């Protein structure tokens, strides 16, 4: 028999629709998010008629809609997002599926509590499509992009916790250096951290444009005609991961995913940088060893050239799947 999901709520965010913030944010603008690796997601999850599925990063609801088509009118999907604005977009996109869909504002590391609160027990599939959506990236007021000048914010949950500017101001040089090295693979982490902290003591950068221009001023001039990434790319990635505690949240989520899956239930995780992918790979590999999973992807699934051409943001996507074994002995 499958026991009901045991509730441990490390984030305290699971009260069925109450999120990390209560703040008001401007509505998202621009084109909807284009889901990545759609067919591989469906292959990995294998949804069939009547299944109960969870999308922990529902975003604009693109993947969720495809899953709902597969589970049919007797199936259901619980969609979670830590961004209330994204959740409203999903609500509109998934309206045709009526009461087959339950949407909850919350963070993925509240999975067990969210399931329990909504009266769900074990599920046949869980999807995580990590990182930020195009809607978040393309909205300057969210402060994720150095290509669109806006407040230096980067919070996935608007108004909750520290903004990227606060993070810069509060961090020591050592913290900042570690963040840039661990989360950005930044080879000049020490120098950038020192310079940034000395800038913060005079006047902290308030906008994404100011931060990007400052980082660029620290780098040697880019060779003409060579398409190298912008010098601020690594710093922005590192700050975003730190501001949203993305790795910590992922590490706390994965055991709950294993706990929430019914035997033979399937989990798919799409990550966009190597740090996340490493966490997922290890969790699945260890899970196969200890009998939590009976199978897992040995290699990540990557988008093909056509998908990258149509959707350049898919280029760094790596998808891994795992299949839950029966109950693990205590
Ligand atoms: C890449 S988008 C997902 C797009 C979605 N698959 C679609 O088809 O539209 C990631 C979304 O997940 C949310 N998100 C990221 N990490 C999260 C987490 N740990 N818990 C809950 N939501 C998260 C972000 O706010 C964003 O809306």
Image (cartoon, grey):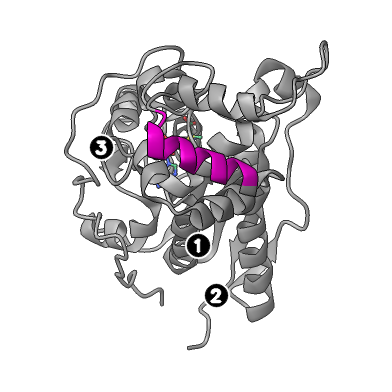
Tell me the residue at 43%/22% (across/down): 135
The disc, 3 or 1, on the residue closer to the chain's N-terminal end is 3
Question: Magenta segment, which residues?
Answer: 191-205
Find residue 55 and report its image quarter: top left
Determine which of the numbered discs, if any, sits on residue 159 in the image: 3
Q: Are the two marked residues, 3 and 1, in contact with CB atoms closer than 8 angstroms?
A: no
The quadrant where ligand 1 appears is top left
C-alpha gap between disc 3 and disc 1: 23 Å
Q: Position of residue 130 (x, y in %)?
A: 52, 43
Label 3: which secondary element: loop
Tell me the residue at 37%/27% (across/down): 206
Residue 178 drawn above or below residue 78? below
Residue 274 drawn above or below residue 281? above
| Disc 2 crowd, CA 10 A, few/some/many (<14, 14-19, 20+) | some
Is 4 included in the stretch rendered in magenta? Answer: no
Residue 79 visible to an observer of this rendering = no
Tell me the residue at 30%/47% (across/down): 106
Please name which of the two marks, 2 or 1, marks the residue nearer to the observer. Answer: 1
Label 1: which secondary element: helix
Q: Quadrant of the N terminus?
A: bottom left
| Disc 1 crowd, CA 10 A, few/some/many (<14, 14-19, 20+) | some
In the rendered structure, the answer to whether residue 327 lies left or right of residue 88 reads right
Q: Position of residue 324 (x, y in %)?
A: 57, 66
Q: Which residue is mark 2?
A: 326
């Amino acid at each position: 028999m499958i026991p009901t999901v045991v509730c441990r709520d490390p984030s305290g965010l699971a009260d069925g629709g109450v999120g990390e913030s209560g703040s008001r944010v401007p509505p998202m603008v621009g084109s909807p998010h284009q889901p990545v690796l759609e067919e591989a997601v469906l292959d990995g999850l294998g949804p069939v008629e009547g299944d109960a599925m969870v999308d922990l990063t529902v975003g604009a609801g693109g993947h969720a809609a495809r899953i709902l088509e597969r589970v049919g009118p007797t199936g259901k999907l619980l969609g979670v997002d830590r961004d209330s604005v994204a959740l409203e977009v999903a609500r509109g996109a998934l309206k045709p599926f009526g009461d087959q869909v339950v949407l909850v504002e919350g963070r993925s590391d509240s999975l067990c509590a969210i399931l329990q609160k909504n009266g769900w027990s074990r599920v046949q599939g869980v999807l995580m499509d990590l990182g930020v959506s195009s809607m978040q990236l393309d909205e300057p007021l969210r402060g994720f992009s150095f290509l669109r000048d806006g407040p230096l914010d980067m919070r996935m949950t608007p108004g909750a916790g520290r903004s990227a500017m606060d993070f810069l101001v509060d961090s020591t040089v050592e913290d900042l250096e570690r963040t840039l090295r661990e989360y950005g693979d930044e080879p000049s982490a020490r120098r950038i951290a020192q310079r940034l902290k000395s800038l913060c003591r005079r006047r902290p950068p308030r906008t994404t444009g100011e931060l990007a221009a400052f980082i660029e001023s620290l780098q040697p001039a880019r060779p003409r005609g060579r398409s190298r990434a912008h010098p601020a790319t690594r710093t922005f990635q590192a700050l975003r991961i730190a501001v949203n505690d993305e790795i910590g949240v992922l590490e706390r989520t994965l055991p709950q995913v294993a706990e929430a899956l019914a035997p033979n239930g399937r989990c798919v995780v799409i990550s966009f940088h190597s740090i996340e992918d490493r966490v997922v790979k290890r969790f699945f590999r260890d899970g196969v060893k200890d009998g939590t999973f009976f199978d897992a992807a040995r290699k990540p699934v990557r988008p093909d050239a056509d998908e990258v051409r149509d959707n350049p943001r898919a280029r760094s996507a790596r998808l891994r799947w795992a299949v839950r074994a029966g109950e693990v002995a205590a």
